[in-house]
Image (cartoon, rainbow, N blue to C red):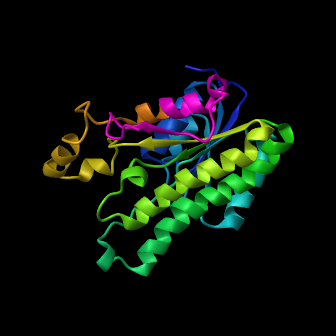
Amino acid sequence: MADFTGKTVVVTGGSRGIGKSVAETFCEAGANVIVTFKNSIDGEYFDSKNIRHYKCDVSDSKQVQETIDAVLKEFKQIDILVNNAGITKDGLLMRMSEEDWDAVIQTNLKGMFNMTKAVTRGMMSRKYGKIVNITSIVGIIGNPGQANYVASKAGVIGFTKSVARELASRNINVNAVAPGFIETEMTGKLSDEVKQNYMNTIPMKKFGSGDDIAKAVMFLASDESSYITGQTLCVDGGIVMQ
């Protein structure tokens, strides 16, 4: 495991699932870890892990700026940003409401824009930074019943490439991680039949874990990946082979 002692890491949507795994892994590697959450968080758990937490709706640019200002006041700089916050509001296109479309795009795509814009000024002035955006393999291959989610995650990939080109000369690496089927509280609610259908698409014939994603994020956030930018790393057991 890379040593992140002295580094300050912000993980959005870090209260559960993949975000929680990422935050915990960075903490174990010695980093100062800040997680944002929108609704609720297990405060006792994060306090015991010495992880700061801020309530912040990433789709609200004012809240984002206030949160980043508070982090900078305490830690002086932000070295790593992990844009993980995301929601789903699934439904077939013909039945999908405009509200459900907007909510997913606002959180998953605009939220990433807000957070990235808020941290890059400091990174540019210091000529150092790592940004890792959590997308999804469905942003590459599509998925019925998730037009809003897929559009947002495809947008994450495009955004990653564009910002990587803008910031490369300032020694800021911008990459994305695309999880496949990862066992979380959310996927745990799926029926056995649905899980088996997913399993049939995975060449490795097993589901991933939050730790699998955290390790990929850690690699892209470390100096071991200093010559990698604008890339999307699929962590999916082989579903997407490019």
Q: Position of residue 165 (x, y in %)?
A: 70, 46
Residue 138 located left or right of residue 78 = left
Residue drawn at point x = 48 percent, y = 61 percent: 152
Q: Is residue 229 magenta?
A: yes
- Between 237 and 69, the one nearer to me in the picture: 237
Residue 151 against residue 16 in the figure, above or below: below
Chain part drawn in magenta: 215-242
Residue 130 in view here = no
Residue 121 located left or right of residue 10 = right
Q: Position of residue 6 (x, y in %)?
A: 73, 27
Q: Quadrant of residue 221?
A: top right
- Between 35 and 48, the one nearer to me in the picture: 35
Q: Quadrant of the N terminus?
A: top right
Residue 201 against residue 89 in the figure, above or below: above
Q: Is residue 30 magenta?
A: no
Residue drawn at point x = 78 percent, y = 46 percent: 72
Residue 64 in view here = yes
Q: Quadrant of residue 164?
A: top right
